[in-house]
Image: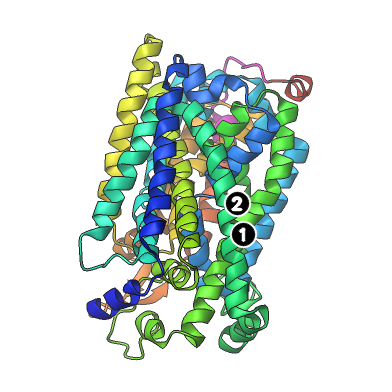
Amino acid sequence: MGNQFTEALSQTNFTALDWVLVALYLSISLFIGLRVKKYARNMSNYLGAGRAVGACLGIATMTGTEMGLITVMYSSQKGFTGGFAAFHIALIAAAVTLLVGITGFIVCRLRDLQILTIPEFYEKRFDRKTRILGGIMLALGGILNMGLFLKVGSMFIVGITGMSQDSRALPVVMTVLLVLVLVYTVLGGMISVIVTDYIQFVVLSFGILAATFICLRELGWGQVMETIQSLKGDAGFNPVNAESGFGLSYIAWMAMLGLVGCAIWPTAVARALAMESTQAVKKQYVWSSLSFMIRFMIPYFWGICAFVFIMTMAPDLKALFFPSNPEIQAVDNLYAMPIFLGRILPAGLIGIITAAMIAAFMSTHDSYLLCWSSVITQDIIAPIRGGRLSTASRILWTRILIVVIGLYILYWGLVYEGNDDIWDYMSVTGAIYFTGAFSLLVGGLYWKGASSNGAFLSLLSGMGALLGLDPVQRMTGLKEVDASTGEVLRAWFTSDQIGLMTVAFSLGVFILGSLIFPDNKKTALPTDTEAAQG
């Protein structure tokens, strides 16, 4: 199987010209990181870009961050396995983001408080211990969440360029990409992130549109639809179908994740906190709702096209991804989309597409590394030190932590073994943070009776989300596994069901904890008038 896979990778159209285009783009990104270093002199500039980002730039940079290579990869995987039924995730994300943009739910009130991180709100609304625990939960969930980003992104590079899996290609690519991201993120902070995100938005927009056009030209819309219908049936179009792999509980979980992705997840909220006004925040979210939908739909379609191509036009790949012999292990379906693009895109254009995907990779990693490192500095180290931490020390700690987290994700990407789809892995690990954060943000901003004790207990309950991870389910007996083959015989709960139960449990703990252990001292909440100002 190793030789067959190496041969399959070697049939890419990637040439020396494409390597030149990729190298040129990476050089520009590093140059920007060096140039903007002089502007990152305080934490407001380093983490929040001086809170001077306008609506147009905010839309572009949010799209650049949220349309990361990890998004392209996990979305194409969902399209590959679920067909057009996966489109419901994109439609839900768009609807929820639009609703947040119209109402300003959560994000506008946070922007009015002029905070740099979400745990900073926890201290303003509740107390310092809640902020510290919130920072720990956020960092834990967030760093675990991005643990596979580096590996999955590098799998795209290996697949589309034709590097041999039998060499050390994957860890080498992981190391090189990580070094590039660390250099310009450490140097420039949020200013570097926003400037490079804008350039990446332009490159990425051109790349995905060109690739989608070629997919349609090569396969034809009719052939795509007919193949999905013949091979998947109604399950390839209807997410409620019992054989689709989704279902009603999964759709409900996607609605929750849609809200989290735009209004609670720190990397998206960081864009709102960096905006020049709450009106700019609303405009950013209204228009970004379209990009939130596109960032899912186009990669889903690429995954669908990869499935159709493999099943109808590439018998060598069909033997790899769907072996007829059950004893032969199938190739990881994350490779399907990049191998497909490597075969259909012409030389030159494939270099631009690869540069666009590396741009997407870097725009996500820089934002996430900056976010989690700043949370540890601002919300764990600084409060423990009693706030006696100079600006220079805060920036230094943040930069050190960016490197430490980067080394961790390199390690985790190499050692983690689980059978979760990447999207499901991310939703479970992210839930460690956002199950408690949802309760604290909604309750803290909109309920005067919310207490610090209820908030503290609610944050702790987020650890229950770990039960949704495949290795944890196997270890705890939530999945019955054949001891000889490792095949899952029965799962007591799916990851989406565990996620929904954790959200409900966390909310219940927050309400009961606040009622049973109320605060003696009431903390002032921002008024609706204050939240509407900007």
Q: Secondary structure at mark 1?
A: helix
Farthest front residue in view: 17
From the viewer's perspective, is 337 left or right of 53?
A: left
Question: Within 10 angstroms of label 2, few (less than 14), some, or many (20 or more) residues?
Answer: some
Quarter occupied by the N terminus: bottom left
Residue under label 1, please give it.
209
Report the residue at 29% width, 77% height from top.
Answer: 7
Residue 128 in the image, given as x and y percentages of width and height: 46, 19
In front here: 253 or 398?
Answer: 398
Residue under label 2, please give it.
205
Q: Which residues are magenta?
A: 511-525
**Vertical comparison of 394 with 227: above or below:** above
**Vertical comparison of 236 with 424: above or below:** below
The kind of residue tagged 1 is Leu
Query: Do the residues under discs 1 and 2 have CB atoms within 8 angstroms?
Result: yes
Q: CA distance from mark 1 to mark 2?
A: 6 Å
